[in-house]
Amino acid sequence: MDDAKGGASYAVHISPEDVQRFCEFLYRRTGLSFTEGKRYFIDRRLEDRIAATGSSSFQAYFSLLRADADHEIEHLINSFTVNETYFYREEHQLRCMTSSLLDVIASHKEPGGTVRIWSVPCSTGEEPYSIALWLMENWPQVDSYNIEIVGSDIDTRALKAAAEGIYGDRALMRLSPDLIDRYFRFVAEGRHQIDDGLRNSIEFTRVNLIDSRDMALHRDFDLIFCRNVLIYFDDASRRQAAENLYGCLRPGGYICLGHSESMSRISPLFRVARFPDAIVYQRPETDHG
Amino acid sequence: MPLVRGSKSPASAAQPAPLRAALDSPDAESRWIAARALSGDADAVPALAAALDREPVPRVREAIMTALMRVGNPASVEAMLPFLRSQDAGVRAAAIEALQAMPGAVAPFMAPLLSDGDADVRLLATELTRNMDASEATRLLCDLIEREQHPNVCAAAVDVLTEVGTPQALPALEKCAARFAATPFLPFAISVAIARISGAEG
Amino acid sequence: MADIGMPKARVLVVDDSSLVRLYYRSALEQAGFVVEQAINGIEAMERVLSESFDLVIVDVNMPRMDGFTFLRSLRSSATDVAMLPTLMISTEAGLEDVAEARRAGANFYLVKPVAQTELVRHVSVLTGAAM
């Protein structure tokens, strides 16, 4: 992606105080922090972003960043993190699901009851299919409950691709050849389609996280994966989305965020819940006055 | 196969009672639903403000504040300001958070807030300048620290100036450091703010 | 002066002002403590649930989750963290506020602005590092 605008031929001077200002802003806004040893990493990213935005000085860039002009926060965070989607990404959360969360969830259900899991945004489907695969492979009680998995996104083209369920080798890089063999079929060289049974078992819907009406159609979830999207929203949108997600959860239901995200930068509505494999957040069972 | 396709959730079964009446419901969930349904409704501001005043449940309070935030007009800001004076730190925190998310609507109120008779209100209000344009924030905060008697209020202002302060702030900061030279923390804080602002021009 | 070989006490500083955190941290690190930070009660809960601390210093006025709410959350936790010593710091000096801090479960209460020497002295006592 080349978004450089009239790149300067000289490097913009960035003082140590500028870097301090920048790091404190970033920490306050996102929770991301860097040890002394990682400072060179920040300097490089900052230089890149200053050049990419055509900023004539650090101050000009910092004003732009604070105002989140042209989604600069998103561009900046993307420059720090690799935002690739693939199967079994952030596996520790999937492990948390089967090692800890489902035990709690299932304890409140009758045998044969329904467990509802939501992947939003689901992008091109890797996440909801991963959830399904992981459950089939790792949850001993998977046959004792009806499991409804919903995958939602704002992007209808992504949803279409998700429903098709065709993936390249890179998306499957974390899956064993055995898993691929059992759940995917060969479509063409380097292209694999996920098993029809799995494709048909996921409900894909279009949703906008900040639209309360959209969101109200999605209810009674036991577990929501909402990873790597809230961090990019502005203050008002983060607040609105969090409130909407709260309404979509059953009391006692859980929500998992992305690995560099924290409810401390998003909303006070959820309880912090620590499990061996992950920190997740819970809609409280009851209200306290 | 344990994985089943769920049917799309039906729209809420019961017709909700008139929404503003539902803000009064003894049931927290009904009040929450009503607040969310009234979100952004400018006509509902008085009803939302009244509901906010008597709401004991934090998540319903949050939803009412979100509803007011979505309106984003002067009346909705005015409805939230009294909560900056609350004895409950949680209510104050919630009010500041909601106001922070509506910088445009809050702007005309900044000067009065920063000269409020209550030091706690002045202190909380400094946080709202963080989202403003740097020159405007600097101007307001320098005005504040030039006349402010409470070191904690100055400290809050200096914290924001450390992030957004322009070189225009340097004289006021130096004077403030001199005035409060005998207090702990503030001289330290001002020296950091001065270093950040000067270093930025380095 | 800490004994050579004694493990350093770990302190979590919770305040939304980066200047306050810097002020406390520099004094505490100089005195031999290991210091981590958080900007509000939610991040503080995440930290205490993930790492072990000997003391949490928590400000009252923080956006999104204030000090009192954090304290109540901490004290109602089902794990060991419920017993974590806490030092609450506030802008208020009234008897009612001190009483409320005690009710919320604070072990000690200081009023801002807190001098570095005063802070170190109290932290030393509360972590048992005092000689």
Image (cartoon, coloured by chain):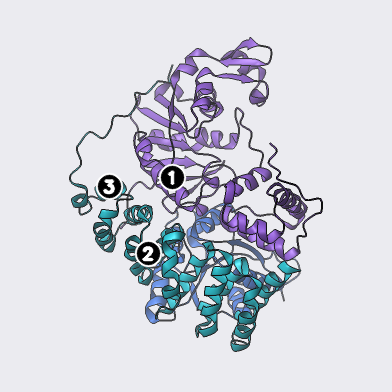
Chain colours: A purple, B cyan, C blue
Residue found at x 72% / y 56%: A56
* Above or below for C49 versus A258: below
Q: Residue flagged by tag 1: what amino acid is it? A: Ala
Res. B29 mark: 3
Q: Residue B62, how many percent across, how many down? A: 36, 55
Instruction: Chain letter for mark 3, please.
Output: B
Rendered-image quadrant of the N terminus of chain A: top right
Residue placed under numbered mark 2 in the picture: B91
Q: In the rendered view, tell whether residue B202 sits above or below residue A27.
A: below
**Structural crowding at the residue carrying mark 3, measured as other residues with C-alpha within 10 Å and reported as few (<14), some (14–19) or many (≥20):** some
The percent coordinates of residue B83 (x first, y second) are 35, 67
The amino acid at mark 2 is: Val
* Quadrant in which residue C7 is drawn: bottom right
Q: Is residue A1 left or right of residue B54?
A: right
* Quarter that holds the C terminus of chain A: bottom left
Disc 1 and disc 3 on one polypeptide chain: no
**Which residue is disc 1 drawn over?**
A241
